Image: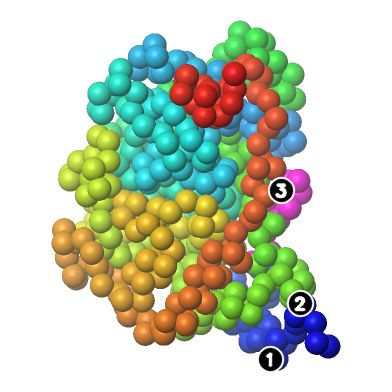
Amino acid sequence: MFSCTDTVIPGSNQLDSQLKEAIRASAELASGQPNLDFYILPDPSDLSSIPQDSAMNPLNSAKVELGKFLFYETGIAVDSKFDSGMNTYSCATCHVPEAGFRPGTFQGIADGGIGFGIRGENRRRNQDYEPDDMDVQDARALSLLNVAFVKNTFWNGQFGANDANQGTESLWSEENGAIVNELGFAAIESQNIEGVHVHRMDINKQMSDEFGYTQLFDEAFPEYPSSERYSQTTLALALSAYIRTLMSNEAPFQKWLKGDYSALSFEEKEGGLLFFGKANCSTCHYNENLGSNEFHALGVKDMHDIDGFSTAVDDFRNFGRGGFTQVESDMYNFKVPQVYNMKDTPFYFHGSSVRSLEDLVDYFNDGVKENDEVPVEAISTKFKPLDLTVEEKAYLVKFLEYSLRDPNLKRYKPEVIGSGLCFPNADLQSQVDLGCF
């Protein structure tokens, strides 16, 4: 009873009960049922339990395995702007597992970048490329974790024909990048069909044979005629299948939800109680993945404010949902993202303007916008001072930092890729960084 380890903190059982009650209330708001199981993420191998595009891209194990290889495959980077970029980048260049499937630096650089570092933090411009030649975006790439639960993807939600995008059909044109909504696929598939083109990737039968992927393509897409089975479209669908299985289901909070009440420390439980209570986080982050299909204006700075590559004041992405819908009330409203594994990289919001979880919590606690371009009247009514104490802010950071962090995302990486090239990048500097020699 005098041991200094495994000490039971007085009141911990009561704290567990309070946290359960708060989570049940959030689940009832989101689903109509006060059930803790609502927030338990599915096992990645249990494909039937994962939300999917059942009509147009049903999951099967071959498709997921194929997508896993292709996500890291630098050999499909064949449409680079210049020769020095050929076969040097992949999807994982900007969605790095060790960085929570986000870029390891403030702005993702695919074609036109060199170097990697440890988790993508040393990615920089290839001197053969001018900034406007580079494959970069004027908004930080969102995490791909738990994205299977996302109904409309992108910070402005432009992808996906249903849910928030019902009634936006007149906007589906090549100019705003949402034409793929007309093809009938769900949001993730729609975005990736557009994405493999935008990110300068492709595959064909010859490449599939050379890399050893043909059998997987055949098993994954038996309904496609052989003339269409090895293409940008099936590439996008295989990537989508793999991405749908990226679950942070080994996070301590997930273990706690399943009954292991020792998985969270006293401080983390206090932080969880704040997340689902006083801090109001769950008023926006209430769906299964602790995100939602809501859009809010928080008045944060844009990517051009921090000197990103090829950014512009008038880029439509700076206007969030309104940049897509052109509706005044949607201006500066950005999608509510999922919040697992935020500790893995220190860049937050669409413009990467906040650089630590402590500063993130301070921003919400203060409830004061930082972007002078965003009018006060546009700010969400949900964004207001929280009056958290110093201790409460520390508890909330603990919950975000540790409880919601899956420590084993490397399980989603293949040992090798079919081309035999270095991955996730294969430029000379990345090969040095990654030890591919």
As helix, strand or loop, the secondary structure at mark 1 comes to loop
> Residue 11 shows which numbered tag?
1
Above or below, comparing residue 383 to residue 201 in the picture: below
Report the magenta stretch's main SS. loop
Examine the rendering and report whether any part of residue 232 can be seen.
no
Location of the C terminus (image quadrant): top right
Query: Looking at this view, is 404 or 314 the one in front?
Result: 404
Examine the rendering and report whether any part of residue 151 can be seen.
yes
Whether pointer 2 and pointer 3 mark residues with C-beta atoms closer than 8 Å, the reply is no
Query: Which residue corresponds to the image point at 57% horizontal and 81% vertical from the top-left?
Result: 270
- Residue 170: % across, % down: 31, 43
Query: Looking at this view, is 154 or 398 the one in front?
Result: 398
Q: Is residue 436 magenta?
A: no
Above or below, comparing residue 13 to residue 309 in the picture: below
Left or right: where 251 falls relative to 328: right
Q: CA distance from mark 1 to mark 2?
A: 17 Å
Marker count (numbered):
3
Categorize mark 3 by other alpha carbons within 10 Å: few (<14), some (14-19), many (20+).
Answer: some
> Residue 247 shows which numbered tag?
none
Whether pointer 1 and pointer 3 mark residues with C-beta atoms closer than 8 Å, the reply is no
As helix, strand or loop, the secondary structure at mark 2 comes to loop
Question: Which residue, given by chain and number where applicable, does mark 2 sit on?
Answer: 5
Q: CA distance from mark 2 to mark 3?
A: 34 Å
- What range of the chain is rendered magenta? 39-54
Categorize mark 2 by other alpha carbons within 10 Å: few (<14), some (14-19), many (20+).
Answer: few
- Residue 41: % across, % down: 67, 59
Question: Which residue, given by chain and number where applicable, does mark 3 sit on?
Answer: 44
User: Which label sits in the foreground, 1 or 3?
Assistant: 1
Left or right: where 23 falls relative to 360: right
